[in-house]
Image: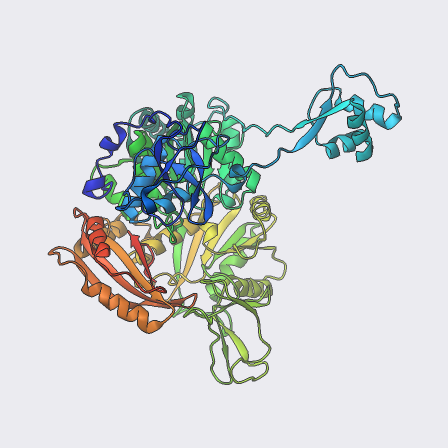
């Protein structure tokens, strides 16, 4: 993988001076970056009795508002004109309680901003501490025994119990002490007033420190070789290792040894997962190997948990962080290893604000920090395969399952020959296989990557299709909730009793299946089955989701029905059969990665079967069993599929052999969006080897009420396409007030 465009790729120059410059003192002029959509720093003057090192968080006035900014070490794309009147504003305060960003974070933010063509302020926004850390929140008070204080003048049985509990000197919340002493809060308040107890701040809980020597693992010969290579990589300078192992081969336990070696060297480790909120099994394995749970970082954390994790990464107290893609922007003090698990997963691509691919940015972060990065997957991306073939990445393979179990046999169900019954979605062949699996006391899984009950609701009387009023998308019926939802903008309404157009009663009919409809059919066919539905919109919280997964693991459900989240690394020992309801779903898209994504999903989900000693079986319902993707899944010939896919990409100069940049022009007025897109295309600089395609109306033409037109820049791999787009954008006139131009370097979505 080429680290970036030529003028920003020389990371060794950036690494030459990572030590933070000395603190600026009172009266000094310092550049400050605001976490807004700004591409430059602004100069401010430090006030009296103030000092601030680069990376420090400061309070400044910006326009009419007070803002928190970051002291930068050097001006970044400074403004051509000085502030009005030439007089610099003063920094109004330094947030000394907040640890400053390390210098490595400043360099990484600049690199990401230049590569993605994003404002530096928006990249820095992803590095900002949680709001609770920036606010001067009053500490939570508790009580403890006031050593040496005389006993209160009036001693009651309740007071005596409270003092006896507090005699150990621990700090407790008043409510906790009252509950433990079996007395009221008024008794505790009375003891505080009498001086027998004293109020003190409750110390924040410390983060547990993983022990690299806590657990031991018995490895297979193939795993042992991979562990040896992994340890060597982790102990050296920058390197990228592709850990390519079949489902159930024990990749996690192998890269845990690299984490252990990193801890022994006194460095921090980051493990990135695409669905951190669902990985309770991963947390259990980690605790078994290292003696405690890792620090988590994802959107489901509470404010206090996010604050502890951010501060722990910055101070070095958090030795191992397991997180979603945003964890890459935590301010690690001593980062020495990054693991990207399920590196092929599209969840690592951010599609809003700053458009970045976290897998690729992890490689950049490791390059800048001169340490190792490991990319792990059972179905590595084409990009990683090509990099391994060309020698950029070390390639480690685990070709067999750790348990010795065979990989599942996968067969196709040709829906042209074995169609479902009228009004049903499961072929009789698949239904019989589910029944046989249940009869053996084993689990079956049905996979359909479609949430809700049905993707379309129409009127059988007038043919009206219920669409989202803000998007060119049909509303999806969620029957369990009694609502129609748009999965693009979040619009929702109750399922109407009459057709919104012709008012015909009882005329609305659901078309097509979602997992709720599959669950309804399964419940009718297998009345005694214990069903579990895994979908992000059906489980209310992270705790509930993890509880459900543990219940499935224990065998409390014998039929699991789920969306693509069931394909993400779960280990269900009793799962013997996987049925894919619609194997063709991802193939009919104008997306150069459609075949690759479908192969990865089907391979991953069928790989959930037979991971223990049970012989696994996968069945894929399809109308196109002759399709190359289906043939590759059924035959298990991944090598032939990769050869074909890589050859097609190379001939078409598509990634990783070429570069793509997507430009999306949007406005609330359709004519404004179209005319602006055409004008932007006409202003594209002439370049012999760079092609500008479009503009064309986007397949998803309207989102949230905004009309969308797309342009696509296509260039050879070796060209600096960012420089081309940067020059193009600089030559554009000031856009209309409602017009938006979104740039996505290395796009993954073509809707």
Please tell me which residue is depicted at 30% across the width and 44% down the height of the picture.
Answer: 82
> Looking at the image, which is closer to me, 8 or 750?
8
Q: 47 left or right of 183?
A: left
Please tell me which residue is depicted at 39% across the width and 57% down the height of the picture.
Answer: 411
Q: Is residue 504 above or below residue 444?
A: below
Taking the image as drawn, is residue 67 in sight? Answer: yes
Q: 204 left or right of 314?
A: right
> Looking at the image, which is closer to me, 301 or 340?
301
Please tell me which residue is depicted at 49% across the width and 49% down the height of the picture.
Answer: 576
Q: Residue 460 at x, y = what percent?
A: 51, 82
Q: Residue 350 at x, y = what percent?
A: 38, 50
Q: 712 left or right of 567?
A: left
Outermost residue, top direction?
148
Query: On the image, which quarter does residue 401 sit in?
Result: top left
Q: Residue 676 at x, y = what percent?
A: 27, 67
Taking the image as drawn, is residue 657 in sight? Answer: no
> Looking at the image, which is closer to me, 113 or 734?
734
Q: Residue 545 at x, y = what percent?
A: 56, 48
């Amino acid at each position: 993988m080429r680290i970036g465009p030529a003028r920003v790729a020389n990371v060794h120059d950036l690494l030459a001076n990572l030590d933070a410059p000395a603190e600026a003192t009172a009266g000094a002029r310092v550049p400050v970056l605001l976490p807004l959509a700004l591409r430059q720093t602004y100069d401010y003057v430090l006030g009296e009795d103030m000092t601030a090192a680069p990376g420090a968080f400061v309070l400044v006035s910006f326009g009419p508002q007070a803002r928190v900014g970051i002291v930068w070490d050097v001006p970044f794309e400074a403004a051509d004109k000085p502030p009005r009147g030439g007089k610099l504003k003063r920094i109004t305060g330094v947030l000394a309680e907040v640890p400053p960003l390390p210098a490595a974070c400043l360099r990484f933010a600049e690199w990401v901003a230049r590569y993605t063509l994003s404002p530096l302020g928006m990249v820095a926004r992803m590095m900002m501490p949680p709001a609770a850390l920036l606010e001067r929140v009053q500490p939570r008070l508790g009580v403890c025994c006031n050593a040496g204080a005389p006993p209160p003048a009036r001693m009651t049985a309740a007071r005596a119990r409270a003092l006896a509990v507090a005699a150990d000197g621990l700090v407790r919340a008043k409510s906790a002490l009252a509950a433990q002493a079996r007395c009221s809060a008024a008794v505790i308040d009375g003891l505080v007033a009498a001086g027998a107890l004293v109020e003190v701040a409750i110390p924040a809980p410390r983060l547990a420190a993983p022990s690299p020597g806590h657990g031991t693992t018995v490895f297979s010969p193939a795993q042992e070789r991979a562990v040896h290579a992994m340890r060597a990589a982790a102990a050296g300078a920058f390197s990228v290792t592709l850990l390519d192992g079949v489902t159930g081969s024990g990749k996690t336990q192998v890269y845990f040894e690299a984490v252990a070696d990193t801890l022994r060297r006194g460095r921090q480790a980051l493990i990135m997962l695409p669905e951190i909120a669902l990985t309770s099994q991963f947390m259990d394995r980690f605790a078994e190997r290292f003696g405690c749970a890792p620090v988590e970082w994802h959107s489901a954390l509470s404010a206090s948990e996010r604050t502890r994790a951010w501060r722990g990464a910055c101070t070095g107290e958090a030795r191992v962080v397991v997180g979603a893609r945003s964890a890459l922007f935590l301010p690690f003090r001593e980062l020495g290893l990054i693991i990207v698990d399920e590196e092929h997963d599209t969840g690592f691509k951010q599609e809003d604000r700053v458009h970045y691919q976290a897998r690729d940015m992890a490689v950049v972060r490791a390059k800048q920090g001169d340490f190792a990065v490991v990319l792990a997957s059972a179905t590595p991306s084409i990009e990683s395969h090509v990099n391994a073939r060309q020698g950029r990445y070390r390639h480690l393979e685990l070709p067999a399952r750790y348990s010795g179990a065979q990989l599942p046999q996968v067969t196709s169900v040709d829906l042209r020959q074995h169609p479902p019954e009228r009004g049903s979605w499961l072929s009789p062949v698949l239904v019989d296989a589910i029944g046989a699996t249940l009869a053996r006391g084993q689990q079956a899984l049905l996979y359909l990557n479609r949430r809700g009950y049905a993707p379309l609701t129409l009127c059988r009387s007038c043919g009206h299709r219920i669409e989202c009023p803000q998007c060119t998308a049909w509303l999806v019926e969620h029957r369990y909730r009694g609502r129609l939802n748009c999965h693009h903008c979040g619009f929702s309404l109750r399922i109407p009793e009459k057709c919104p157009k012709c008012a015909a009663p009882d005329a609305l009919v659901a078309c097509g299946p979602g997992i709720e409809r599959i669950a309804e059919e399964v419940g009718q066919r297998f009345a005694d089955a214990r069903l579990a539905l895994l979908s992000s919109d059906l489980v209310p919280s992270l705790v509930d989701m993890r509880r459900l997964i543990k219940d499935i693991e224990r065998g409390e459900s014998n039929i699991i029905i789920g969306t693509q989240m069931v394909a993400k690394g779960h280990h269900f020992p009793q799962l013997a059969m996987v049925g894919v309801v619609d194997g063709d779903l991802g193939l009919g898209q104008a997306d150069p990665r459609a075949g690759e994504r479908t192969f990865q999903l089907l391979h991953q989900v069928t790989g959930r079967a037979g991971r223990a000693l049970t012989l696994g079986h996968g069945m894929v319902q399809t109308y196109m069993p002759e399709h190359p993707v289906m043939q590759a899944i059924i035959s298990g010939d991944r090598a032939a599929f990769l050869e074909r896919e890589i050859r097609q990409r190379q001939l078409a100069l598509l990634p990783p052999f070429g570069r793509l940049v997507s430009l999306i022009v949007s406005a609330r007025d359709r004519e404004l969006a179209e005319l602006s897109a055409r004008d932007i295309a006409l202003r594209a600089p002439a370049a012999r080897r760079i092609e500008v395609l479009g503009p064309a109306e986007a397949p998803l033409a309207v989102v949230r009420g905004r009309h969308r037109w797309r342009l696509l820049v296509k260039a050879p791999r070796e060209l600096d396409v960012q420089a081309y787009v940067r020059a193009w954008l600089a030559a554009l006139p000031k856009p209309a007030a409602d017009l938006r131009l979104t740039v996505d370097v290395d796009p993954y979505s073509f809707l």
